[in-house]
Image (cartoon, rainbow, N blue to C red):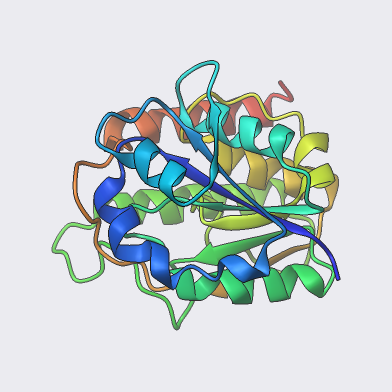
Amino acid sequence: MPEYSLVFLTLNEITGLRALFDRIPLDLFSEILAVDGGSLDGTREFFREQGIRIVEQARPGRGEAMRTGAREAKGEAVLFFSPDGNEDPGDIKPLLEKLAQGYDLVIASRFMPESRNEEDGKFLPLRLWANKMYTYLANKFFNRSNHYVTDTINGFRAVKREAFLSLGLSEQRFPIEYQMSIRSFKKGLNIAEIPTREADRLGGESKALSIPVGLGHLKVLTQELLGN
């Protein structure tokens, strides 16, 4: 049986942790760790009570958190989980099952027919439109397979550790997932998706501010097109 590492990515997510923790299938993992960006709301104390190792980030940002988690993990593959309420613990097992089928990267897609996006039903779902546009461009310019990847941006994903490290990811903040998807296309990695139903956020405010994150994705797309 392959060994998998569960990496929590947190910054002040105690509300989500308390609501979701008992639903997470911890028994599927050989290792569990938390990369924390300096929480002050009880998140760190919660992890200590559960006996979960906390890893400090050298610098802020989701990109730094993911790289730190992948470096620290010992499993053959890493599943990144943010306990903010958007990500469904029930999708963890299907993500790992896809990995076991031989895929290098498995993404929980918010845009497959059976999926739900947090902005579904809104009059002006601007983030949804932006996500779909960037996903289309990534597929058009970089995807050489016959399989269209519907969600290149969602961070709820599992990836083989060696594949992750081979990509040389450099993004510091949220666009690291987009950079990971594009570079996976470039390397010809085997990518699969499962449908996910994104729930509403639990507690606090999203750290992914629409305009800065959108500009970050544009920067990544431009850099990858230019071969930087």
Q: Nearer the viewer, residue 78 or 223?
A: 78
Could you tell me which residue is drawn at 68 percent across and 30 percent down? 169
On screen, residue 161 versus residue 35, left or right, reads: right
Let me know if residue 16 appears in the view.
yes
Q: Is residue 6 above or below residue 90?
A: above
Q: Nearer the viewer, residue 192 or 20?
A: 20
Residue 141: give x, y in percent of width and height. Answer: 67, 46
Could you tell me which residue is drawn at 84 percent across and 52 percent down? 188
On screen, residue 52 versus residue 160, left or right, reads: left
Residue 199: give x, y in percent of width and height. Answer: 30, 67
Could you tell me which residue is drawn at 17 percent across and 57 percent down? 124
Q: Quadrant of residue 66?
A: top right
Q: Name the residue at the bottom extreme.
A: 114
Let me know if residue 150 appears in the view.
no
Residue 133: give x, y in percent of width and height. Answer: 44, 51
Could you tell me which residue is drawn at 52 percent across and 73 percent down? 91
